[in-house]
């Protein structure tokens, strides 16, 4: 009987084992995870949990649900190595044989070497449920917060903190990106933060720690904070695979289907998929779910052929930010609509031949729906000129 081992109880890993059973796979399935406790999803950690919600609400399902579909779940069991030829995953206490292996260990908080001293002095990161609980407990109206990093995670942390009345400083880049959004597409970001009371600093920053507080020199500004969060990015949790598979800075290299090697697959943040780099859903939960279903279909002999439009979203200060399709770095950005201040907030992304390949909007569900319907069509120049 065939044995599928899934390493990582991320949303991609859990979706994969569920999809295998839904597709009729009747072999053995083992789900390994380095963390203890039930599988959970990460988006609520920087939103609901930081807002004071119950961390258990992030649960994907409980262990009994996995048992009910015949999945052996082993929490607190990290994989430490892989023998591809021998079809074995190396664990701390012995090896586990597999016929098909799915890598779904996701990502870990990226902390560049110059910043590791900040973590040693008590700075927070936010990647796991434990991280979110610790950060939520540290925040209060009398505790000033500084967030180093103005991308998706840093922006969501700042948004949640100011909504709780926490004085918040965001240490960002002058031309900040937000996930797949950059340039004109990301221009509304820093003004939005400032309009909601976030102190945004974009000058070169020096951070020191003493007497229980963080001292921040940002250009001419001299600031102090009780809590510091380092949110400068995510790295693929793939170091344990470096001796056995082709691992690059963005994870394990695989083809467009997620195939790494015969019988070895990758989904989610750990998967460096060929041809997907400019999809707006790259390294999002939505992408992990789609990839997991595709891989499950390939293993079960029932490949999925439903085209999925890549999608990205975030909620910042009550504003829904959305994007769909692809955003190549050299694409042309055309504004389709403007907000009450006259600033563009709905955009079309256009390739060299005039085809709309991407869409984005800030706080305009109607505008986003309209822009999304234009994907794959020639840009309406009259619409773009409005």
Image: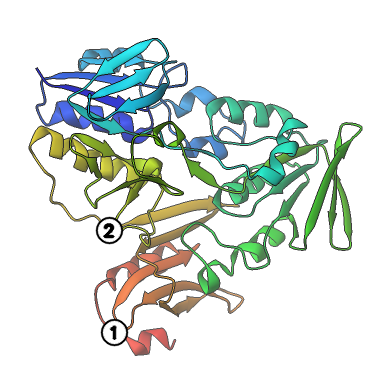
**Frontmost residue, 114 versus 331:** 114
Identify the residue at image location x=89%, y=63%: 220
Q: Is residue 314 above or below residue 285?
A: below
Where residue 138 appears, x then y in whole percent?
73, 29
Mark 1 or mark 2, which is nearer to you?
A: 1
**First along the sequence among labels 1 and 2:** 2
Q: Secondary structure at mark 1?
A: loop
CB-based contact (under 8 Å), mark 1 and mark 2: no
Specify the quadrant of the image occupied by residue 3.
Answer: top left
Relative to residue 195, is residue 5 depicted above or below? above
Looking at the rendered image, the quarter that the N terminus falls into is top left
Q: Which quarter of the figure is the C terminus placed in? A: bottom left
Q: Which picture quadrant has residue 122?
A: top right
Eyeballing the image, is 221 above or below 65? below
Q: Which residue is mark 1?
A: 353
Residue 99 is left or right of residue 1, and the answer is right
Q: How far across and how far down the image is residue 113, in percent?
A: 66, 43
Please provide percent x and percent y for residue 341: 61, 76
Residue under the image location 74 percent in, 40 percent down = 228
Which label is found at residue 309? 2
Q: CA distance from mark 1 to mark 2?
A: 20 Å
Q: Nearer the viewer, residue 162 or 281?
A: 281
In the depicted structure, whether residue 299 falls above or below residue 91? below
């Amino acid at each position: 009987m065939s044995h599928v081992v899934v390493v990582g109880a991320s949303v991609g890993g859990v979706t994969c084992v569920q999809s295998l059973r839904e597709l009729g796979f009747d072999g053995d399935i083992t789900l390994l995870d380095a963390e203890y406790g039930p599988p959970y999803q990460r988006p609520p950690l920087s939103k609901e949990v930081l807002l004071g919600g119950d961390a258990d609400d992030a649960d994907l399902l409980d262990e009994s649900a996995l048992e009910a579909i015949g999945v052996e779940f082993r929490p607190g069991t990290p994989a430490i190595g892989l023998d591809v030829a021998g079809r074995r995953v190396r664990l701390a206490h012995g090896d586990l044989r597999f016929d098909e292996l799915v890598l779904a260990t996701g990502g870990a908080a990226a902390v560049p070497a110059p910043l590791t001293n900040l973590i040693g002095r008590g700075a927070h990161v936010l990647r796991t449920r434990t991280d979110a609980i610790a950060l939520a407990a540290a925040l209060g109206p009398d505790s000033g917060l500084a967030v180093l990093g103005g991308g998706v995670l840093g922006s969501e942390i700042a948004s949640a903190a100011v909504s709780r009345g926490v004085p918040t400083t965001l240490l960002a880049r002058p031309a900040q990106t937000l996930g797949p959004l950059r340039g004109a597409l990301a221009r509304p970001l820093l003004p939005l933060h400032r309009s909601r009371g976030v102190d945004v600093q974009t000058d070169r920053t020096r951070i020191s720690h003493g007497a229980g507080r963080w001292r921040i020199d940002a250009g001419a500004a001299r600031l102090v904070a009780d809590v510091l969060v380092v949110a400068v990015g995510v790295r693929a949790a793939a170091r344990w695979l470096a001796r056995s598979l082709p691992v690059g800075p963005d994870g394990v290299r695989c083809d467009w289907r997620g195939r790494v090697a015969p019988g070895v697959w990758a989904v989610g943040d750990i998967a460096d998929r060929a041809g997907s780099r400019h999809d707006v859903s790259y390294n999002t939960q939505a992408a992990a779910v789609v990839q997991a279903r595709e891989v499950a279909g390939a293993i079960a002999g029932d490949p999925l052929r439903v085209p999925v439009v890549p999608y990205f979203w975030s909620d910042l200060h009550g504003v829904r930010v959305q994007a769909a399709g692809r955003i190549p770095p050299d694409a042309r950005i055309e504004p389709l609509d403007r907000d009450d201040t006259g600033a563009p907030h709905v955009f079309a992304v256009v390739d060299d031949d005039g085809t709309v390949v991407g869409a984005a909007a800030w706080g305009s569900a109607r505008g986003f729906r309209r822009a999304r319907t234009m994907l794959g069509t020639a840009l309406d120049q009259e619409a773009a000129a409005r």
